Amino acid sequence: MPCTPSDMKTVADIVARHDADPTRLVQILRDVQSTFRHIPAAIMDRLAAQLSIDRAQVQAVTEFYTFFSTEPRGRFDILISDSITDHMLGSREIAAYLCERLGVTPGQTRADGQVSVDFTSCTGMCEQGPAGLVNGYALTNLTRDRVERIVELVNDGTPVSQWPREFFVVKDNIHRADLVLGTKLQPGSALRWMFQRGLDSTLDEIAKSGLRGRGGAGFGTAMKWKFCREATGSTERFVVCNADEGEPGTFKDRVLLQSYAHQVFEGMTVCGAVIGARRGYLYLRGEYLYLHEPLNAVLAERRRAGLLGSNIIGRPDFEFDIEVRIGAGAYICGEESALIESMEGKRGVPRNRPPYPVTNGYLDQPTVVNNVETFAAAALIALKGGAWFSAAGTEKSKGTKILSIAGDCARPGIYEYPFGTTMAQILADCGGTGAMGLQIGGPSGIFIGAQEFERVLGFEDLPTGGSFMIFDQRRDVLEIVRNFTHFFAHESCGFCTPCRVGTSLLKNQLDKICAGHGGKADLAELTHISKLVRATSHCGLGQTAANPILSTLERFPEQYEQRLKAISFEPGFDLDGALEVARRMSGRDDAHAHLAQEA
Ligand SMILES: Cc1cc2nc3c(=O)[nH]c(=O)nc-3n(C[C@H](O)[C@H](O)[C@H](O)COP(=O)(O)O)c2cc1C
Ligand code: SF4
């Protein structure tokens, strides 16, 4: 259907609001989706023309992100978090009840166009689930009573802005604060100290602190800043805060952004001064849309206080500002190069590395990408010095780590610990003693059993980006692993065959075993594919997607064996048929996109 004059005007206004800047395509599509409830083909044509980009790019970006759709979603678009911890809190039953009461089928829009309900990957509310989103805004603590009320509100057409406030309350739930959460930072104080001490000395303090990236990989922060600062041949440098926080079970960045935003922005500003950047971006996951306005309010406050903009704290030589960009439901956009692609208005497909973002990042310019917690820690180190930070922790892991604890424990929430703390101590503090196992570092991390609870938090033993999920004896290990494996198959960006095909194969193989149709050959095949996906995938997603399977096969082989049938092999599915959807999504149908199954 062609655009009406009124649609054309609406689209022109959206594009103008974004300065007709093609790097803002994801932001523009977010606005189109929320205005039209989908992204119609005719509007893709208009966008391509107005932004002077290929129509194919608009379509590819639309189809890449799960928050965009080409078919109309409901006026009330409800998504239920599909994380394992939400399942444990009853999300599946709540979703079924909601669908029944609303008369909708999951994944479809009701015939009157009023409502759609579907599942989405972890929304980062793991300790206050079952959780979900309505028109992008976080819903917490869903109960049957709340569902009844939601059904009335939807059927009456009450705008989401008039729904009861308590449906949207997101608590911090901080139970243990240490260096980062327990130190008050007066806005601007770290910047003043930095200029007093000098930029070189500030970088030295960051180095002395031993701070390593808190997003998971643990690269030395001072080293990263130094490489970026020294990169040659650039016209500009950028600071990017990775607030994508998509790893299921992780929600500590949510709390930092909600209650410590000044500290995070101050850390970004310190980085900007050290590396010589004038612009910073905070890439906020779409699921945290509710934080957009509050974050912008803090930025405005900092501008008014002379802590952003030009002439920062009276220094005519220092200019720096920060903009928030929002994602659209793609876990892979947490990977730093995919995040940069997304910020440039493209599909979030990880780049080939090297070159790394420190030399060729946003707009091909030197860019520091750091996690939210890394910037929050850096601000305090600029204020209090490296020794203050490095006094806590272990030889290889200095300072503290903020954990997001969820699952089977009495007091789920946020806990900050010095590195070197044992799992047993953490479990005792949060009321999780008696756990059968822990998943550390989210699905891409590892699963450990009770006999390993003397192991410690740290890069040298058990690293984590923050996710810490607890499972007691009632839980079925294979169901947990199945949830994680489905997550990876869903979130694979489809760019490389081992991950695109392999994660689908792992999912199907595990489904077959869980359904009681697996034989010994299937188990061998599961291990074989797992190792293949790990060894040959292009980026960290594929390289870690088999971790849950491999770490539980090693520790709980009996759980798998109990499910096996006596026969040695039963073909469980039509391989090519099973991969058809993935091939269509990625536009791949060449010979290399097909894998023959080895019997
Ligand atoms: C699939 C994937 C998802 C990731 N998601 C995140 C994320 O949500 N937040 C984050 O800070 N880092 C994430 N990372 C790590 C980033 O690529 C990058 O290492 C990090 O942002 C660097 O910041 P840091 O040095 O402060 O940790 C992810 C990596 C991969 C492979
Ligand atoms: S490993 Fe997976 S997520 Fe990473 S590039 Fe390949 S297909 Fe995409």
Image (cartoon, rainbow, N blue to C red):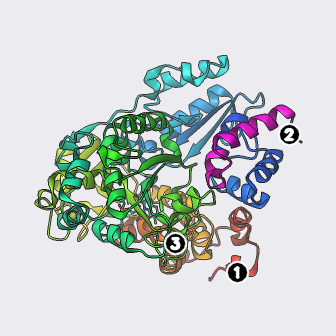
User: How far separated are the C-alphas under marks 2 and 1?
Assistant: 39 Å
Residue mark closest to the camera, 1 vs 3 = 1
Please tell me whether mark 3 sits on a helix, a strand or a loop: loop
Residue at position x 60%, y 66% in the image: 504
Vertical order, 130 against 542 (above or below): above
Near mark 1 (Cα within 10 A), the count class, few <14, some 14-19 or many ≥20, is few
* Type of secondary structure dominating the magenta stretch: helix
Asked if residue 335 lies left or right of residue 78, the reply is left
Asked if residue 361 lies left or right of residue 446, the reply is right
Can you tell which quarter of the image residue 31 is in? top right
User: How far separated are the C-alphas under marks 3 and 2?
Assistant: 61 Å
In the rendered structure, which amino acid carries the disc numbered 1? Answer: His
User: In the displayed image of the protein, which residue is found farthest to the front?
Assistant: 316
User: In the displayed image of the protein, which residue is found farthest to the bottom?
Assistant: 598
Residue under pointer 3: 566
Near mark 2 (Cα within 10 A), the count class, few <14, some 14-19 or many ≥20, is some
Residue under pointer 1: 592
Q: Position of residue 160 (x, y in %)?
A: 57, 24
Mark with earlier residue (2, 1):
2
Mark with earlier residue (3, 2):
2
Dividing the image into four quarters, tell me where ligand 2 lies.
Answer: bottom right
In the rendered structure, which amino acid carries the disc numbered 2? Answer: Cys
Residue under pointer 2: 3
Q: Position of residue 157 (x, y in %)?
A: 66, 19
Mark with earlier residue (1, 3):
3
CB of mark 1 near ligand 2 (< 8 Å): no
Please tell me whether mark 2 sits on a helix, a strand or a loop: loop
**Tag count:** 3
